Image (spheres, coloured by chain):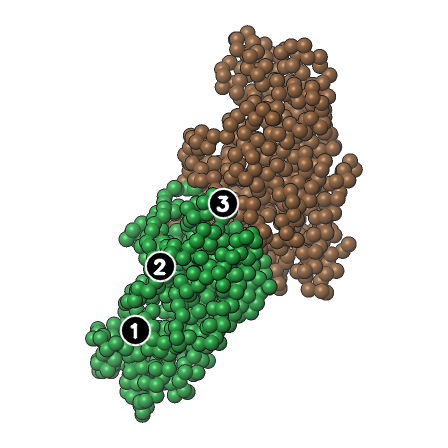
Chain colours: A green, B brown
Amino acid sequence: MRWEIVCFVGVLAIVLAEDNYLFETKYIDVPLDHFSFAQDTKFQLRYLINDTYHEDRGPIFFYTGNEGDIKNFAKNTGFMYDIAPTFSALLVFVEHRYYGESLPFGNQSYSSIDKLGYLSSQQALADFVYVIEALQEQYAHNQKNLPVIAFGGSYGGMLSSWIRMKYPSSVLGAIASSAPIWQLGGLTSCEIFNRITTSVYASFGTDKCTNGITNVWKTIRSFTKTAEGKANLTSTWNLCSPIKTDDDINQLIDWAAELIVNMAMVNYPYPTNFLADLPAYPVREFCNRLNSHKLNGDYDLLVAVVDGLGVYTNYTKTAKCNNINVTSPSLSDNGWNFQSCTDMIMPMCSQSSDMFENANWDFAEFSDTCYKQFKVRPRNLNVPLLEYGGKDIEAASNIVFSNGLLDPWSGGGVLRNINDRVRSIIIPDGAHHYDLRGKNDLDTEDVKYARNFHVRKIKEWLREYYSDPQVNLIKK
Amino acid sequence: MRWEIVCFVGVLAIVLAEDNYLFETKYIDVPLDHFSFAQDTKFQLRYLINDTYHEDRGPIFFYTGNEGDIKNFAKNTGFMYDIAPTFSALLVFVEHRYYGESLPFGNQSYSSIDKLGYLSSQQALADFVYVIEALQEQYAHNQKNLPVIAFGGSYGGMLSSWIRMKYPSSVLGAIASSAPIWQLGGLTSCEIFNRITTSVYASFGTDKCTNGITNVWKTIRSFTKTAEGKANLTSTWNLCSPIKTDDDINQLIDWAAELIVNMAMVNYPYPTNFLADLPAYPVREFCNRLNSHKLNGDYDLLVAVVDGLGVYTNYTKTAKCNNINVTSPSLSDNGWNFQSCTDMIMPMCSQSSDMFENANWDFAEFSDTCYKQFKVRPRNLNVPLLEYGGKDIEAASNIVFSNGLLDPWSGGGVLRNINDRVRSIIIPDGAHHYDLRGKNDLDTEDVKYARNFHVRKIKEWLREYYSDPQVNLIKK
């Protein structure tokens, strides 16, 4: 089932080797349940803080953590560091409950639904508000609260837009990068995600490349019908464990598809190691490799595709074999799968218009899978829409939604201005939350424009917030 | 402790004898916990519906139920019935969880914190959103959702303003009558409530009346120091049970003070039976009675005050004696006391500037009382402010806050315009959510003006919402 293998970049993030972005690690006790009083448990939420640039009444730049270790997001959100001096901003990155070290029940947090059940976006937003309150107590010095600007990419971007919508007194404005809030609950056609991925490969490769991917799935299935074929593919693809069953083959296909999707998401113009060690424009590199092969039959195609996948799996030439259970060294998508089953339901499917195996969106089947895995069923497709407004977000203000058109998630993003105060900015050549990354000599003009747009909007919001004498806190 | 005896009108409401306002009673299953997934319990929420006036694309007028039986609110919110024909509106009144018949665990709902803990304003708002969704499925006929206008008085008014703030895609606008959202968390000085009550008695009576009330408390205490005095007061005040202990005397004083407050709240210009059978302007009647006595000593004052209280306790001359455990036949303030301890914390106190016994607001003592009664402590005074924004509600839109200046709760109300779309309307001579009552020949010009203001605002919101051809749904 396709929905399972589609993960946000966040889930897959690995720790950057470089430590350009410094922070201090702190913890705060937050209530397990912000909305009921049936029990009074608290747990430790982790957050990262850097007050190097902060002066007196400067704003709080607040990253609303994703479904993963918050350190990875701090290290891959250099934009906040880049602009902090301009605003004399306090930098804070708050971990999302049930990820990283912020586990309410330690290593038992995922053990049963009565423990895992407090993983929800609403509870996470309330955690963030709780942290903001604590920061205000510490940094506002009993004066008017410091203005808070939320930042987030991907699911974190959804959260940053929602925290502004739901808690506007805590958060003045939000930069929501690559936030597919309209991927929820069937607001966007389920096939868009895979169709965009396909078009990214078409743009950076050729028809030969997308045709190769389109054909490889049935080639894998026919090639592995026999035990001999399975052994042959295991060897050709240098798999760590031999494929033996139909489940293994499904797993192999999911793994390869996810790598192909991931390369589209992080198709940045310079080498990165966010998901894996990757060259600039990994999609182009993948297609270059695939296209370099002559395709005279099934076997040739299999060789060509695994050569392409090597861009992702072994760019540093240190991997010994391909482990189809791992798409990123720190993969931990259990939490996100749970959220997909509960309040972040995002229907996904593949059709003949994309290069992936056909797969329908089947709510009943989806529900069964959720129940099997978590003993929970999605209550209703509409749940996230009722909570966050679906497409009707006219009442919101002070939000920038940015989307790269080369990002598969952009299909579920907000690609038009909602009103004067909820603006959309498009990065035509951008991948997944590219604009939140630190500046780079190879940055495109499109992303520079988007970042300038963000800065301009933040200045507007802050100018309104500050009384006149304080406006000069914005240095440039 | 004064906070305990201050109840919203809602808590005290009794069923109107008249049945001018018709409805059908329905039930809907709603999740016990909208924000977590630790358990999947549902329970039956009651709502009342009247579709007599509803046509095709007409709006839903949605009463966000208070801390009491929803039928009483339907019967005392005639304004919605009065204007429904103009708007072709569907009328819906939804009960608040844990009140009336909407008890998640039946008669065990209040038995322990693990059951009672799901009583919270946030859960109630989510219930309402859930009901709206069900109504849309039934009445919008797969077209664009019908516009929903929320109405509420007192705590119900707070909820109606908050449902617009938190769920603007579900609710287009809100008429929040006598909604003391700034009584929360210490945003308003704790003594304002009692000071306003005092000024109401000063306006409708004389200094003699307010001085009488001011003096009666210490008179009661000194008069009842002896057993003989206790017996004498029991007899003079025609109490159903003799007062014997200091606790009895505290109880007597709380009871008398609450009756005095209640008369200010429902000091309407015509006879009502919302809290009790009462004449027009019960405060004036109280003071007239008190003032008719010559006050030549303690005993005279006690006689005068109990004569005044008779306006409330025995206007129909059918009561046999005064029961100091009851301030209204259907009193059931357990739920509200719980909410006061958790998410609706409203500091209250009495000082020498008002006519009540002095009482400080003491958070520690308050917390102890909460723990004793419910095994729960208020988490933090700021909790409701973080959730609902406190005084910073600039980001909101399409809300009218109406307040009668003769209403003790108006001190915690929104008495100024917040922005172009969050408006305040003052009813100088109005008591507690007077404007939501059905029209009456004795209505004041002030309340008529407020009701017209509401209608004008609702029309503005609806005109924006409807596409042009549908505007004529608004008939006048």
Q: Where is residue B242 drawn, in percent x and y? A: 54, 14
The crowd level at tag 2 (other Cα within 10 Å; few <14, some 14-19, many 20+) is many
Give residue B462's quadrant in the image: bottom right
**First of labels 3, 1 by sequence position:** 3
The residue that disc 3 covers is: A143
| Residues marked 1 and 2, same chain | yes
At x 72%, y 50%, the residue is: B455
Q: The residue under label 2 is which amino acid type?
A: Ile
Please indicate whether residue A271 sits to the left or right of residue B156 in the image: left
Q: Answer whether residue A222 is visible to the viewer in this image.
A: no
| Residues marked 3 and 2, same chain | yes
Q: The residue under label 1 is which amino acid type?
A: Asp
What is the chain identity of the residue bearing mark 2?
A
At x 54%, y 29%, the residue is: B349
Indicate which label's residue lies in the foreground, 3 or 2. 3
Callout 2: SS = helix
The residue that disc 1 covers is: A277
The residue that disc 2 covers is: A70
At x 51%, y 68%, the residue is: A453
Callout 3: SS = loop
The crowd level at tag 3 (other Cα within 10 Å; few <14, some 14-19, many 20+) is few
Q: Where is residue B461 drawn, in percent x and y? A: 67, 56
